[in-house]
Image (tube, coloured by chain):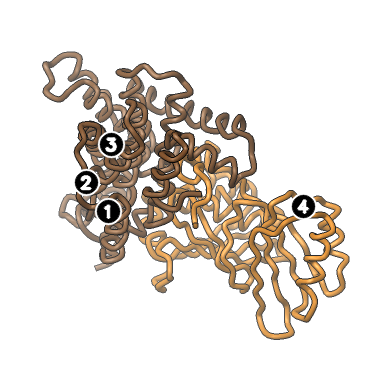
């Protein structure tokens, strides 16, 4: 079993395999289950993701608090009616990522990738990039294994929860996972996937978890949007041959250290950052009747 | 390695909005319920840290109760768990604590039905993954990803060997083992993760070992 991204790339290169295949074989070894059984479970996850994307783009999604919902549709309408500036794949990825995270905020069914707070980025980029690359269904499932391999390395060497490491651990990890998977689906090498992870994660370092009223809505939905954008651009940069000066595993280690140094007020406690703004506090009081945090 | 499977990262399928505060909370509740083995009449839940601060926004209370009702993280009934518990006649009490815990997402759950009671302390470590750190005062660190054998026994020599002997006969390999006790010579708990399934017959054989009080098998998956 690989323990970090360098080992993952080493195994993939030495055996002439893709990252997704290394992950599938590692899973077979650890779980003692057949390839078919493992693939079947991931196909099931893909189905849930597809439904969530579709719901977010076509239904009128509104969260219980009323704070989020409808932005994914807004972006799709804009793309159809206006001469938008960024490319269609990028805006589709953003819109689909928002769609899934809006469904999550409305207590809909999603797949945690790696968490629910960051659940838009991996499926959002997957379905947007698939529109362009037209992969087989199996290649789409492989995308999830490739993303999972990177998430596995991050989770075991740092963290993937906002309470432990801030938003960099959630949206940051999801963005890095998506970047690597996009590279693999687009035909890039395992090393380029690793570079995409480093490039993406470096742009998420230090991001705090400061949800308004403690709800997974503001700013989570919009951070899922930009996570999808960063993942897509990072994948293109890596495939252009751009390299991170700091190696991928050291970027992950930096994320861990930054998370440990982050104050508790900025780690999913709704005590600091955007949650502590005047508007954040007003929303909190409106939703729960009282401020959750005593003066 | 805390995360062993790719499905810890791509998964679980769940009802939103938070994997640590909703799905993780539900799983802690469900572990407590499975350890109790039946529907409790009363559930006392204490939230610490980030759980205590943000449980309302994340629906952690609703999710924990859903777990205590034995619902999965993807069960759509999760949203209405408080009402379902009330209809079932379950008395649910929630408190938050300012006590600092090692992990930011910690929940203490006490379940009882008048005759029996259980106390579980669980932490939600991210992405829906949980660990049980305490069971009826015994300190442990168990993820319940694979089937876990729990043996409650008197704290005396030869107990580990006796249980291991049964597993050896059945060619069952031990993946992980933890032992914990209250005081020397009092009660002790052995927790064993096995690679192969443990049959009801093996459970019975272990139950027959002298000084063994109770045996159970638990898995979240």
Residue under label 3: A68
Q: Are marks 3 and 1 in contact (CB under 8 Å)?
A: no
Which of the labelled discs sits on residue A251, or is there none?
Answer: 1
- The hue of chain A in the figure is brown
- The residues bearing labels 2 and 4 have C-alpha atoms spaced at a distance of 49 Å
Question: Crowdedness of circle 4 by 10 Å Cα count: few (<14), some, many (20+)?
Answer: some
- The residues bearing labels 4 and 3 have C-alpha atoms spaced at a distance of 47 Å
Q: Are marks 2 and 1 in contact (CB under 8 Å)?
A: yes
Q: Position of residue A131 (x, y in %)?
A: 32, 18
- The answer to whether residue A115 is visible is no
The verdict on a common chain for dots 4 and 3 is no
- The residues bearing labels 1 and 4 have C-alpha atoms spaced at a distance of 42 Å
Residue under label 2: A244
Q: Secondary structure at mark 3?
A: loop
Identify the residue shown where x is 36% and y is 27%: A185
Which of the labelled discs sits on residue B198, or is there none?
Answer: 4
The chain carrying label 4 is B
* Nearest to the observer: residue B124 or residue A128: A128
- Position of residue A295 in the picture relative to residue B178 (left or right): left
* Nearest to the observer: residue A21 or residue B197: A21
């Amino acid at each position: 079993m690989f323990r970090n991204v360098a080992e993952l790339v080493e195994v993939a290169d030495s055996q002439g395999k893709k990252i997704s295949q290394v992950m599938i074989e590692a899973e077979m070894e650890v779980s003692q289950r057949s390839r078919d059984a493992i693939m079947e479970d991931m196909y099931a996850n893909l189905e849930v993701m597809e439904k969530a994307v579709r719901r977010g783009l076509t239904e009128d999604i509104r969260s219980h608090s009323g704070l989020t919902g409808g932005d994914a549709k807004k972006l799709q309408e804009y793309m159809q009616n206006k001469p938008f500036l960024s490319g269609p794949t990028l805006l589709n990825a953003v819109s689909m990522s928002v769609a899934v995270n809006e469904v999550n905020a409305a207590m809909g069914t999603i797949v945690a990738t790696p968490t629910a707070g960051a659940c838009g980025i991996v499926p959002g980029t997957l379905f947007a990039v698939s529109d362009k690359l037209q992969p087989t269904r199996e290649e789409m499932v492989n995308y999830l294994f490739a993303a999972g391999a990177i998430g596995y390395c991050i989770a075991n060497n740092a963290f993937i929860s906002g309470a432990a490491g801030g938003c960099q651990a959630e949206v940051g990890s999801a963005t890095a996972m998506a970047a690597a998977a996009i590279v693999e689906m687009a035909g890039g090498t395992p090393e380029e996937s690793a570079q995409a992870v480093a490039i993406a994660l470096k742009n998420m370092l230090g991001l705090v978890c400061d949800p308004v009223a403690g709800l997974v809505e503001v700013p989570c939905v919009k951070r899922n949007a930009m996570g999808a954008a960063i993942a897509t651009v990072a994948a293109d940069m890596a495939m252009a041959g751009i390299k991170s000066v700091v190696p991928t595993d050291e970027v992950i280690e930096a994320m861990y250290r930054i998370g440990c140094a982050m104050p508790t007020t900025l780690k999913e406690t709704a005590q600091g950052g955007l949650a502590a703004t005047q508007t954040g506090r007003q929303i909190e009081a409106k939703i729960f009747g009282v401020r959750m945090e005593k003066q | 390695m805390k995360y062993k499977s790719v499905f810890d990262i791509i998964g679980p399928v769940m009802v939103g909005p938070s994997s640590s505060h909703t799905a993780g909370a539900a799983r802690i509740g469900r572990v407590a319920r499975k350890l109790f083995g039946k529907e409790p009449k009363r559930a006392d839940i204490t939230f610490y840290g980030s759980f205590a601060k943000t449980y309302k926004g994340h629906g952690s209370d609703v999710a924990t109760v859903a777990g205590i009702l034995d619902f999965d993280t993807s069960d759509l009934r999760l949203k209405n768990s408080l009402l379902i518990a009330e209809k079932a006649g379950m008395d649910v009490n929630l408190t938050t604590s300012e006590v600092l815990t090692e992990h930011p997402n910690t929940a203490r759950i006490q379940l009882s039905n008048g005759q029996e009671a259980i106390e579980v302390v669980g932490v939600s470590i991210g992405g829906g993954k949980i660990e049980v750190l305490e069971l009826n005062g015994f300190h442990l660190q168990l993820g319940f990803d694979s089937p876990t054998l729990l043996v409650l026994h008197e704290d005396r020599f030869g107990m580990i060997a006796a249980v291991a002997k049964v597993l050896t006969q059945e060619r069952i390999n031990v993946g992980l083992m933890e032992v914990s006790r209250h005081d020397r010579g009092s009660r002790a708990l052995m927790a064993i993760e096995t690679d192969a399934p443990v049959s009801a017959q093996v459970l019975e054989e272990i139950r027959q070992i002298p000084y063994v009080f109770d045996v159970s098998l638990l898995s979240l998956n």
